[in-house]
Amino acid sequence: MPRPVILGVVGDSAAGKTTITRGLVRLLGEENVTHVCTDDYHRYDRRQRAERAITPLHPDCNYLDIIAQDLLHLRRGDAILKPVYQHHDGTFGPPVYVRPERFTVVEGLLGYYLPEMRDAYDVRIFLNPPEDLRRRWKVQRDCSRRGYTTDQVLSELDRREPDSAEFIRPQRRFADMVIRFVESAPEIGAGQAHLDAEITLCEGLPHPDLSPLAAVGGLPSPAASGGSQILHIPGSLEPERAAAVEEAIWGRMHFATHLRSRRLGEFTVGTELRRSESLAIVQLLILYHLVTAKASVALGAEGARSRAEEPVAVEAAL
């Protein structure tokens, strides 16, 4: 059996990591995906962090060497015994046995910090929302799900800011895709279902040509920036135009039509289920790289990055 394909999703706390990955897991099938959160590898529980005046964003607060080791095992197809950090009370639970499936999704704060960690991923995503938007998301999440008050969350955000600036945000330079959701017109109050998405496709993976994708949906033409492509997806994109863009992407994944689903782009606010067209397109572009990497591995290549050297042979095989 070919080795698992590993997706990394890194970003600061409440940057949207779970929202991005949840739709991908549904699409690929939960039975085909192993999920790992690197928060489970915290060195100290919540009380110990307070006593030591250290934040979970600091490398010294995490067993990074064990994360790197476990990622290597998962890439080889070996099972691991993973620690468990319980966010609801900040303590550790019993470790769990984790077996890699066809795809492994790894999300967390410091997933690209060490070179040996970065080498384990087939696709590396970094989420980079504006800080004011991320702070609102964190307040909303931590107050509704983790029992904090607004003042407590804002105080903790201020305390974490130096570590965020030094250790978390610099990891974006290691990403294959940097994804930034922004409010196009916050004064109108359009809400999370209509956030603009700015997708930067960086050097390292053979990305699809975005120009035809933009054309079919009437999107702005992709901009070139230092070897990268930047695609802007308006949050106001009509469902019909969004569907045309999605159809164009699916057309480049004829070998994965069995994965087609209408459940991309979904997210929850409280208990209410909503849909975002820009989120759906972002998730579909990530899916493109995952299934392309899977096809490359099935052909005996090391992964999707090797396609840059032999694109013709791999495309023909797909």
Image (cartoon, rainbow, N blue to C red):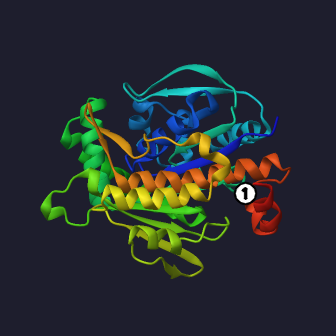
Q: Quadrant of the C terminus?
A: bottom right
Q: Which one is in front, 43 or 146?
A: 146
Q: Quadrant of residue 123?
A: bottom right
Single out the residue that lies furthest toward the right. Answer: 300
Q: Which one is in front, 139 or 166?
A: 139
Q: Residue at x 43, y 60 (%)?
A: 244
Q: Is residue 26 visible?
A: yes
Q: Residue at x 79, y 61 (%)?
A: 316
Is residue 118 toward the left or the right of residue 134 in the image?
right
Query: Where does the image place residue 50, in percent across and percent down from the top left?
Result: 38, 36
Using the image, determine if residue 37 lies above or below residue 284.
above
- Find disc 1 in the rendering and name its residue: 304
Q: Residue at x 30, y 30 (%)?
A: 145
The count of marks equals: 1
For mark 1, give the secondary structure: helix
What residue type is disc 1 on? Ala
Pointer 1: residues within 10 angstroms few (<14), some, or many (20+)?
Answer: many
Q: Which one is in front, 270 or 92?
A: 270
Using the image, determine if residue 38 lies above or below residue 301.
above
Q: Is residue 110 visible?
A: no
Q: Quadrant of the N terminus?
A: top right
